[in-house]
Image: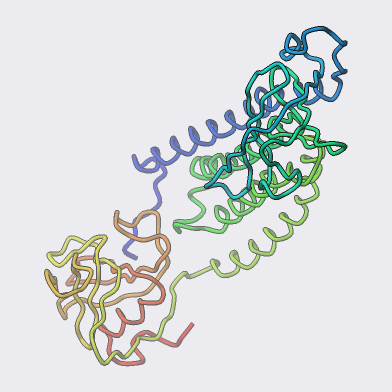
Amino acid sequence: MIAEKTDVTRPGNRVAKTVSALTGCGLLLGGVLLLLIPMGGALDAERDFRAAAVCAPGDDPAAGRDEDCLRTTAARIDRTERVTGRKTQSYWLYVTEADGRSTRTRLEGGTQDPPHAEAGESLRVTYWRDQIRYVDFGAERFHTMADPRGAYKLYCAWGLGLAFYSLVFLWTWFWWARLSRLSVRASPWHVVVPVLGALGLTAAGAFAPWVTDSPGGAIKAVGLCVPVILAVCAVVALVMARRQRGDDTIRMTPFEATGKACFPGGVLGDVPYEGRGGFLVAGPGYLASTPDMTGATLRREVPRSLRPVRVRPPYRTDPEGSDPRGLVLECDDDGVPVLIVTSRKKMPRVLGALLPTPTAGGPAR
């Protein structure tokens, strides 16, 4: 086997553990802070707004605009201005109040949606803490974009999403620290499955606040998703564990090409025809590495002395330049280990270039 034994003390592995731990802790801290500080403030504002009473009548309506009570005053629409470049339609409503003060507020929807805002129409605007929170068109009331009700949902979605997303990195750190000796694969099932579960929780946490009416309701909704996520992860774990059990050699039938093709891939090893992170040119009895995406120039032809050994998944111990999403062909060139990396779809072409006979790669898997 070309790949070396797993060594969790390697500098690259130590860096991976450190980066995973720091990223996970940072995301978790960011999520918790969002839930405690901005979301807490938004919930306080919503509670105060719901409990606010109408201001006592006074001679100067403008005097109470910044108070905690609700102060309503008459106004006239001067003009509207559509907000573009957003998925949700909205527009600015410019008004002049009874005391001559000009201001603006933002409403959701288009100007042709209720309320039908046109210049010259009369309306009543209601202030709370120096912002217009809702407007009255006759008997109809429409809350503005400054309505504090539900403002917590954005912070809740980001907070829960970041907190659950941190589990991806925290589990990766734990795996590197405690479980990495279990498998040399680049993507073993005991990494993939927990990460899949953490991503499922992240999606549930980010979506739950928008379909519930409180942070507690959002957490309960996530809790309802947990059994489903666990069931999916259990099935994936069983399938992946079964596939990754025992010998990881992948038997593949060579592709008998009639012409040459260029595709992403590389040759790794202490050989003059090495080509990392570039392209491969494969044809009948011909294989070369090249940095040219067209495959027309700078080719480094693989010699006929190169002998394929086996196709396998990527390992963490593979040299830099391998693709964890593809496959690896272990080869031997007069005692020098060589790796050829490319996608699963293109590996039969590589085998066909090195072993043109149909039986060379074994039966199809």
Question: How far from the left and from the top, in percent, is residue 314?
Answer: 40, 62
Depth check, front residue: 144 or 184? 144
Compared across the picture, whether 363 is left or right of 204 comes to left
Compared across the picture, whether 242 is left or right of 132 comes to left
Question: How far from the left and from the top, in percent, is residue 242?
Answer: 60, 68
Question: Could you tell me which residue is drawn at 80 percent across and 43 percent down?
Answer: 212
Asked where in the image residue 214 lies, by quadrant, the reply is top right
| Rendered view: 148 above or below 12 | above
Question: Could you tell me which residue is drawn at 58 percent across and 51 percent down?
Answer: 195
Q: Residue furthest front?
A: 120
Compared across the picture, whether 130 is left or right of 50 comes to left
What's the coloring here? rainbow
Asked where in the image residue 36 lies, by quadrant, the reply is top right
Compared across the picture, whether 146 is left or right of 357 comes to right
Q: Could you tell me how many numbered marks the image carries?
A: 0
Depth check, front residue: 159 or 327? 159
| Rendered view: 322 above or below 34 | below
Asked where in the image residue 161 lies, by quadrant, the reply is top right
Question: How far from the left and from the top, in percent, is residue 133?
Answer: 74, 28
Question: Could you tell me which residue is drawn at 26 percent across and 81 percent down?
Answer: 261
* Quadrant of the rendering where the N terminus is positioned: bottom left
Question: How far from the left and from the top, in percent, is residue 349?
Answer: 32, 82
